[in-house]
Amino acid sequence: MTETSPVARRRTFAIISHPDAGKTTLTEKLLMFGGAIQMAGEVRAKRSGTQTRSDWMAIERQRGISVVTSVMTFEYADRVFNLLDTPGHEDFSEDTYRTLSAVDSAIMVIDAAKGIEARTKKLFEVCRLRDIPIITFINKMDRETRDPFELLDEIEQTLALDTAPVTWPVGSGRSFAGTIDLRHKLLRRIDVEEEPTPVSGPDDPLIDTLLPAHEIDAWREEAGLALEACKPFDLDAFREGHLTPVFFGSALRNFGVRDLIDAIAEMAPAPRDQEADQRTVAASEPRMTGFVFKIQANMDPNHRDRIAFIRVCSGKLARGMKAKLVRTGKPITVSAPQFFFARERGIVDEAFAGDVVGLPNHGTLRIGDTLTEGEDIVFRGVPSFAPEILRRIKLNDAMKAKKLREALQQMAEEGVVQLFLPHDGSGAIVGVVGALQLDVLKDRLQAEYGLPIDYEQTRFSICRWIEAKDKVEHERFLNAHGSSIANDLDGDPVFLAANAFSLKYEQDRWKDITFTDVKDYQ
Ligand code: G4P
């Protein structure tokens, strides 16, 4: 893979943060660096429509939260960036986890006054499971902040992750004057738009003109310590997920963002090799492979389309090509693959490993599906989590039962909710990780299918997938618990328990049965 090959040029990443840390602001600023919407080079795109991302879902506007996960592609410094957006609200964390299965690196945004917050920690842990390298951006340096060393220490202690400050702040809050690049000894000033100025180091007299006199000595001591005592940036340790380069800035003031995007271009890895069930697929392989990590409905209110987001893992996805949908063994035609830009989407002729394209379809593609040029492999790592809330659907109009079944099946395939069909023939149960998913389901059933529904409590509060090496034992367990067993969308059985006690009771009695709370999509 040469540096100029299409794969080597790709950077596919996400931003992880706690709500309010500045993810949206930073995203906007990153997209500005992308500048022009059209893509040059091997990706040619046609404009189509001028719809804004925020139009995609009325519910997103109503609630003022980002419900949808989407991708934004832009070019900068001879790199193609695919920024995968993740929902801010934790009720949609399933979506976020799936999205993180499709990235090669992540930016962790931390509010300089608050440090590591709960959701940042949780999302970081998901990244760690996949050894995703993390670049840290300490944001809001233009406001009152905590001490930079204290913040670095907190990252190291809370996340067990080494830190290497690449830039160091010159002042903070009202006296925030810029940053100094510790590796290259360059001063970037917040009040000057130009390229950074070379300096001799923290002792450079230029800095005396930037900070209030009473802050200078303390700052020099601190910056000197950062230079001497902090770990230097180590590319291998970063790529292996053991060390995070740290940048300081202010997304709102568009400061430090250029250093950050340069870091993604230079330090962040090109598309990684991906684990499939039979083998590891190298990004440089010539034949196309990819997987679906997200289905999005209603992106365009004028067209009732459903878009499957595919992460291309190897080869070239070409417009018009035939691909094999491994789950069904059937071919599908990739007739109108789409790229997504800041405000528009367009048809692309070709996409490469690392790219994320949308394939419009009418329900053929599901989350977790693998597409290949013929090979029977299935990519791993697009997870499904045991729901934490279970509800039965109440439909007042019995005539519409069949329509409801179809609609629920579709919603489950899109990953809006999980669907469980009890073995005893009682009504379908939906499961969600966050309560807002239930609101989305209800709104969409009404708006798209004309189905007014309500929810009823069930006697179950816990759901676990059940597996056993011994098929007879598995069968025996299913038969003994008929009214507490249901099938998921793939036909895999789950055990529904009233509470943690009854789950524990069964676990103690059935030692050969494994109860799991996470499953890879098939
Ligand atoms: P999120 O997506 O992570 O939830 O955060 P978002 O970008 O929406 O930012 C949350 C708030 O923090 C916003 O203010 C935003 O303007 C502010 N903010 C983001 N980056 C910076 C920064 O570098 N410095 C300062 N001082 N503020 C920053 P808000 O008042 O909640 O929203 P708005 O009314 O400004 O939109």
Image: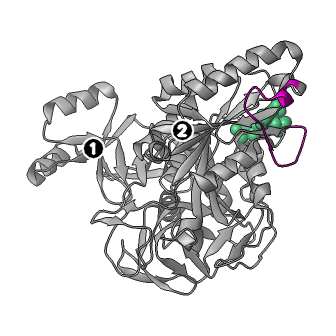
Task: Where is residue 121? Give x, y as percent.
Answer: 53, 31
Foreground of the two, 296 or 261: 261
In the displayed structure, does residue 58 sit left or right of residue 493? Answer: right
The answer to whether mark 1 and mark 2 are in CB contact below 8 A is no
What secondary structure characterizes most of the magenta part? loop
Q: Residue at x 75, y 58 (%)?
A: 53
Can residue 495 be seen by looking at this rendering?
Answer: yes
Q: Position of residue 102 (x, y in %)?
A: 50, 57
Identify the residue position indicated by label 1 in the image.
Answer: 483
Magenta-drawn segment: 190-208
CA distance for labels 1 and 2: 50 Å
Residue identifier under label 2: 244
Image position of 74 with respect to 287: above or below: above
- Callout count: 2
Q: Quadrant of the C terminus?
A: bottom left
Q: Mark 1: is the Cβ under 8 angstroms from ligand 1? A: no
What residue lies at 85% left-to-right and 37% top-to-bottom?
190
Quadrant hosting residue 82: bottom right
Q: Is residue 355 left or right of residue 32?
A: left
SS at circle 1: helix
Q: Is residue 338 magenta?
A: no
Please state the quadrant of the image where ligand 1 appears: top right
- The mark closer to the camera, 1 or 2, is 2
| Labelled disc at residue 5 | none
Assess whether residue 204 is covered by the magenta stretch.
yes
User: Residue 304 lies in what quarter of the image?
Assistant: bottom right
Residue 313, position in %: x, y?
46, 67
Amino acid type of the residue tagged 2 in the rendering: Thr
| Residue 181 pos. (x, y %) | 70, 38
